[in-house]
């Protein structure tokens, strides 16, 4: 994701307002690989700017999405997630226990079977791996080595 200064310039060239609240959101997203929820962005921004509104956070992430700077994800975790990684093709891992979301680069993404291609045009494919992360689940046991 672009830096806060780069996003500030982009917003200005697009005629969008740049406020200290928006710049705080830009800073929170830059380098963030945790796929934060809008609510968690709001909570983090409030520590820096107590008067920021949830509406401002939503409007900012929607503006960022419209400019192609983030992707908003519904991964079935109950909250919209913000994915600032728009530079690389990837899919997602989702922990069903704690909600952790991580990027997964895939070299091959499944395609639609041929019999459906005549009646349906695919615009996007989403692959979501669901399971339990190593912090939430039991650690895999090591198999005994042959002696």
Image (cartoon, grey):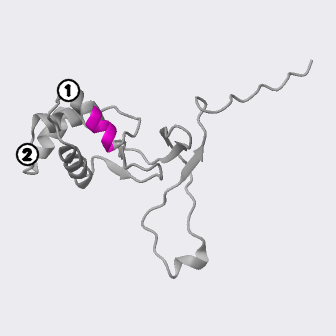
- Pointer 2 with pointer 1, Cβ within 8 A: no
Tag 2, which secondary structure? loop
Q: Which mark is residue 80?
A: none
Quadrant where the N terminus lies? top left
Of labels 2 and 1, the one closer to you: 1
Q: Which residue bears the numbered disc 1?
A: 48
Viewer-side residue, 128 vs 132 = 132
Instruction: Specify the segment rendered in magenta.
Output: 38-43
What is the chief secondary structure element of the magenta stretch?
helix
Q: Which image quadrant for residue 96?
A: top right
Above or below 138: residue 105: below
Disc 1 crowd, CA 10 A, few/some/many (<14, 14-19, 20+): few
Left-right relation of 43 to 10: right
Q: Which residue bears the numbered disc 2?
A: 17
Residue at the image point whose x is 18% and y is 41% from the top:
53
Quadrant where the C terminus lies? top right
**Any magenta on residue 41?**
yes
Tag 1, which secondary structure? helix
For marks 2 and 1 on the same chain, the one whose residue lies earlier in the sequence: 2
Determine the residue located farthest toward the bottom in the rendered image: 119
Q: Position of residue 3 (x, y in %)?
A: 23, 33
Q: Position of residue 58 (x, y in %)?
A: 24, 48
């Amino acid at each position: 994701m672009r830096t806060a200064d780069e996003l500030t310039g982009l917003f200005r060239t697009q005629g969008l307002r740049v406020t200290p609240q928006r710049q705080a959101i830009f800073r929170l997203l830059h380098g963030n690989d945790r796929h934060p929820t809008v609510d968690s962005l709001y909570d983090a921004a409030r520590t820096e700017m107590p008067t920021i509104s949830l509406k401002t956070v939503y409007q900012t992430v929607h503006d960022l999405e419209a400019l192609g700077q983030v992707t908003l994800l519904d991964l079935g975790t109950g909250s919209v997630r913000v994915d600032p990684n728009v530079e690389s093709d990837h899919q997602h891992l989702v922990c069903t226990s704690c909600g952790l979301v991580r990027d997964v680069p895939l070299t091959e993404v499944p395609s639609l079977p041929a019999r459906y291609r005549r009646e349906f045009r695919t615009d996007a494919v989403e692959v979501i791996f669901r399971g339990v992360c190593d912090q939430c689940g039991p650690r895999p046991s090591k198999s005994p080595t042959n002696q």
